[in-house]
Image: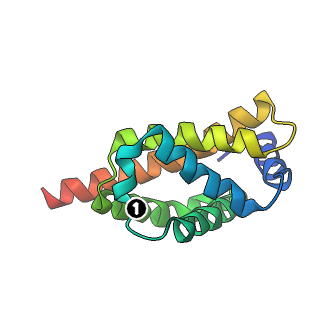
Amino acid sequence: MFEEQVKQTVRSGLARLRGSPGNVTRDFYVHLFKAAPSVRPLFRDDVDVQADKLLDMLVVLVQSLDHLQELVTEIESLGVRHAAYGVNEEHYILVARVLMATLRDHISNWSDQDENAWGMLLDYVADLMITGAREANGAAA
């Protein structure tokens, strides 16, 4: 799916996190709500709980880089659930931009290689989630 260098770069990035890994996802939500206050109402649960879920998903993705195809159905289902919460396709662009900026701030010695590798992974996940949401919306129509 991804070249070995991309997978190694992503794995290395997770290992180079500064501070607590939970700080990354908590900071992500702070930055997200600052960049787009209109998305805050989409998050009915405690944001710390949501941050923990995001961290868990990032860890699973990194641990599963050698067999991401096994997660396709689960990721598409995640897109279906997000659509039900009111997430639209433009939100994925926003989330990817803010998450990349947050990773950039938290991964030591961030490089262009990190930017490209994480961008590929985040784009892959967003594409699958959008596909799941589109298929669910098409089935509902």
Name the image colouring. rainbow
Instruction: Identify the residue position indicated by label 1 in the image.
Output: 43
> Is residue 94 or residue 65 the one in the foreground?
94
Q: Tell me the quarter of the picture where residue 115 sits.
A: top right
On the image, the x and y values in percent for residue 59 come to 69, 63
Q: What residue is rendered at 66% in x and 43% in y?
A: 102
Report x, y in % for residue 114: 76, 37
The secondary structure type at the circle numbered 1 is loop
Residue pushed farthest top? 112
- At horizontal 58% and vertical 62% (from top left) the residue drawn is 54
Most extreme residue toward the left is: 141
* Quarter occupied by residue 53: bottom right
- Where residue 106 appears, as percent x and y from the top left, is 76, 46
Is 78 situated above or below 102? below
Q: Quadrant of the C terminus?
A: bottom left
Of residues 104 and 123, which is closer to you in this image?
104
Rendered residue at 57%/68% (across/down): 48
**Residue 12 in the figure: left or right of residue 99:** right
Q: Is residue 69 left or right of residue 5?
A: left
